[in-house]
Amino acid sequence: MTPILGTVLGREGAEYRVVTGGAEVRAVLRGKVKLSTPKVVVGDVVQLEADAGADLHGIIGVEPRRTVLERRVPGGRGVRPIAANVDQVFIVTAARNPDPIPQLIDRLLVLAEADGIAAAVVLNKVDLDPGTALGERCRRAGYPVYPTSIKTGEGMDTFKLALAGRASVVAGPSGVGKSSLLNAVQPGLKLRTGELSRRIKRGRNTTVSSVMLPLLAGGYLVDTPGFSEVGLWGIDPRELAECFPEFRPFLGDCRFGDCWHKSEPGCRIHEAVAGGAVAEDRHQSYLVLLAELEGQPEEWE
Ligand SMILES: Nc1nc2c(ncn2[C@@H]2O[C@H](COP(=O)(O)OP(=O)(O)OP(=O)(O)O)[C@@H](O)[C@H]2O)c(=O)[nH]1
Ligand SMILES: [Mg+2]
Ligand SMILES: [Zn+2]
């Protein structure tokens, strides 16, 4: 018997919401899936077993993942999958309130690169600040940048076009407006959003778990809780330079074949920084992340 397949939209406790054949059902892990890694996450395509008359379906298997966005926990505490089978990641930052942290954006971009998922940057709250320098920095690194505001509607049409027909995930710090953007993309979603001031008092995220939302225009959008710590555990230090797209044209041409692009003579990345082709603070981010991957934790905030 061929199993029924469904896509996981969300999870509440032990129960998963799964869409199958156009209908939403509730399901729980059954049998050996309970013990297996990887854990079931939003976006996973699962095999379902329906019990006649039972309210809950059983999840009896997970189909191979096309992609998986993983959050790596600092301090080597492991890898936590966030969403499976997504085509693109939008790293969301606010131009202001909260103030952007370029190094955190770089970390998230590296994470997407390491997971082989196309990344872009959403520069939200441009009604508060144009964020020109930050946008330019990300564009120069090779990423598409979407300036948006849910207050003025600026940039929303372009952002919507980039989402249509694809499976996308938004990621970024708490309070930058991820859920607000999704509500603006598709009125009716009614995702909870929260004031920054109240959030700081409460000390936690407004969005508490990842959810996948089918878009009327086709495709899916995954909302995630903002994370404050993003480690790069598990990435091979040798692969890090490849995770900076603007470095790629220069890689392989350094004087030493095993160049780490720190301060070696004849380093093409250094020349590119001196010549302005690579931004100095992107190279700085590279050095900080490299030190971390080499096991020498450094302050980066
Ligand atoms: N001025 C302005 N405020 C915005 C904009 N987008 C969102 N906000 C506000 O920013 C606050 C946080 O928005 P949320 O959508 O809850 O942020 P989030 O990124 O989903 O946060 P978490 O769920 O905690 O990760 C809310 O008070 C929103 O009204 C914008 O474009 N401009
Ligand atoms: Mg949210
Ligand atoms: Zn080099």
Image (spheres, rainbow, N blue to C red):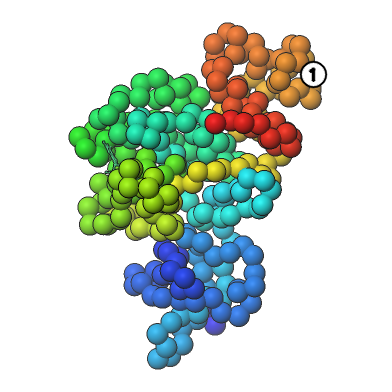
Position of residue 252 in the picture relative to residue 300 (left or right): right
How many residues crowd mark 1 within 10 Å: few (<14), some (14–19), many (20+)?
A: few
Residue plotted at (40% across, 25% down): 135
Q: Where is residue 205 shown, x and y percent of the image?
A: 41, 51
Amino acid type shown at disc 1: Phe
The image quadrant of residue 121 is: top left
**Residue 155 x/y as whole percent:** 27, 34
Label 1 lies in ligand 3 vicinity (Cβ under 8 Å): yes
Q: Residue at x 42, y 64 (%)?
A: 10
Under circle 1, the secondary element is loop
Figure check: 25 above or below 212: below
Q: Is residue 266 left or right of residue 287?
A: right
**Residue 33 vertical placement versus 65 (above, below):** below
Q: Is residue 263 above or below residue 114?
A: above
- Quadrant (top left, top right, bottom left, bottom right) of the C terminus: top right
Q: Nearer the viewer, residue 151 or 253?
A: 151
Q: Quadrant of residue 64?
A: bottom right
* Outermost residue toward the top in this view: 275
Please give the residue where the numbered disc 1 appears in the rendered image: 256
Ligand 1's image quarter is top left
40 sits left or right of 178 in the view: right
Q: Quadrant of the N terminus?
A: bottom right
Q: Residue at x 40, y 91 (%)?
A: 53
Does any portion of residue 123 appear in the rendered image?
no
